[in-house]
């Protein structure tokens, strides 16, 4: 994801695999107690799921709201599965005032994120984006095993005018959790893009072979007793994953200062943006070089990922 500021308010599930423990809501459990998902037994089902995943990376956005890659699609791998300061876009590290973060040192923290971008002009009220728990799966180099390291709703966010996610948010977001804690919702504000996150956490990033992130979303009425405007809005959701040099890094860190005055966090990458409707849909990102004859598919800047066949041979929990 691109030009952002404050990126995380609270850590959710924190996995410190280097220490062999997983921390969640104050609890500490052995790493081998973290659930390991099974591959779907039906090959046809598995292939259909992978097809959707590859399309979520390789197709264009449903709507373009600018000219950069995140705004047009398809998805892209930036640092991908290689979170080192030297594996960052050339234009970025050459534009850094200080070169401290441009090194072979592994960046130590991860933050999954999503955006909901509005495209309608008319002022529409009484609409929210409702989201399931955000899932982040990591494939480990050490044992070639997928593990789910994040499974929680978005915990915080903000609104940026004009869908331009630069600097600090113009409006802090209020989150509306469901009574059972399974879902969370945020208002749709015409002319503003919503950017949410699950929280940053430290990780043994050198053990990352692949990432897979997903969240389900739909439009709901803020007040069911008021008019149903769900078909009058055009909103897209896009997801991705960021790396931080260390936990607590923020966009205002002096070591991230750019010569042109801009602000940017190189992340792992992002998927394409898709329309949100009143029906549940799934939105995904993965470090896969998915191919597409129309768009040319996923590329890297600079990148780091697996092939489609490698994902077929060892698919994430889909």
Image: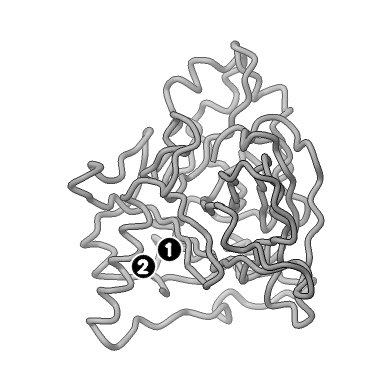
Question: Is label 2 in a helix, a strand or a loop?
Answer: loop
Seen from this angle, which residue lies furthest left? 293
Count residues near mark 2 (Cα–Cα under 10 Å), then give few for <14, some for 14-19, many for 20+.
some
Q: Are marks 2 and 1 in contact (CB under 8 Å)?
A: yes
Residue reaching furthest to the bottom? 41
Q: Left of 228 or right of it: where is 207?
A: left
Where, by quadrant of the figure, is residue 88 drawn? top left
Instruction: Find the distance from the CA under tag 2 to the CA under tag 1.
Output: 5 Å
Q: Which residue is mark 1?
A: 140
Q: Secondary structure at mark 1?
A: strand
Residue 253: % across, % down: 72, 28
- Answer with left or right where residue 70 lies relative to residue 115: left
Q: Residues within 10 Å of mark 1 (few under 14, many from 20)?
A: some
Residue 283 vs residue 9, the one in the foreground: 283
- The N terminus - image quarter: top right
Q: Say if 312 sits above or below 208 in the image.
A: below
Q: Position of residue 39 (x, y in %)?
A: 35, 81
Q: Is residue 296 above or below residue 17?
A: above
The quadrant of the image that shows the C terminus is: bottom left
Residue lying at 68% horizontally and 77% vertically, measured from the top left: 182
- Disc 2 target residue: 144
Q: Is residue 193 above or below residue 302?
A: below
Q: Horizontal and vertical percent for residue 6?
A: 73, 40
Q: Is residue 81 visible?
A: no
Q: Nearer the viewer, residue 210 or 30?
A: 210
Identify which residue, 58 or 130, lies in the foreground. Answer: 130
Q: Nearer the viewer, residue 214 or 78?
A: 214
Q: Which mark is residue 181?
A: none
Residue at (78, 36) in percent of width and height: 170
């Amino acid at each position: 994801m691109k030009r952002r500021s404050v990126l995380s308010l609270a850590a959710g599930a924190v996995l410190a695999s280097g220490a062999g423990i997983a921390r969640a809501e104050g609890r500490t459990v052995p790493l081998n107690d973290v659930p390991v998902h099974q591959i779907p037994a039906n090959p046809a089902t598995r292939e259909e799921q992978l097809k959707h995943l590859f399309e979520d990376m390789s197709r264009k956005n449903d709507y373009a709201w600018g000219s950069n890659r995140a705004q047009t699609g398809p998805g892209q791998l930036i640092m991908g599965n290689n979170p080192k300061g030297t594996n960052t876009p050339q234009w970025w590290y050459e534009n850094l005032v200080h070169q401290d973060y441009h090194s072979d040192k592994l960046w130590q923290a991860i933050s999954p994120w999503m955006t909901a971008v509005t495209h309608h002009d008319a002022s529409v009220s009484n609409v929210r984006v409702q989201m399931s728990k955000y899932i982040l799966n990591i494939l480990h180099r050490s044992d070639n095993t997928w593990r789910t390291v994040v499974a929680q709703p978005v915990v915080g966010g903000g609104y940026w005018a004009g869908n331009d996610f630069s600097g600090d948010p113009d409006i802090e977001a209020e989150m509306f959790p469901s009574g059972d804690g399974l879902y969370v919702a945020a208002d749709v504000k015409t002319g503003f893009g919503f950017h949410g996150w699950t929280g940053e956490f430290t990780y043994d990033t050198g053990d990352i072979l692949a990432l897979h992130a997903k969240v389900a979303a739909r439009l709901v009425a803020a007040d069911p007793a008021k008019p149903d405007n769900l078909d009058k809005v055009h909103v897209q959701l896009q997801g991705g994953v960021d790396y931080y040099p260390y936990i607590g890094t923020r966009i205002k860190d002096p070591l991230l200062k750019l010569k042109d005055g801009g602000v940017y966090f190189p992340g792992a990458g992002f998927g394409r943006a898709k329309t949100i409707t009143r029906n549940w849909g799934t939105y995904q990102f993965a470090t896969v070089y998915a191919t597409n004859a129309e768009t040319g598919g996923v590329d890297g800047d600079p990148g780091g990922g697996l092939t489609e066949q490698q994902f077929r041979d060892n698919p994430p929990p889909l």
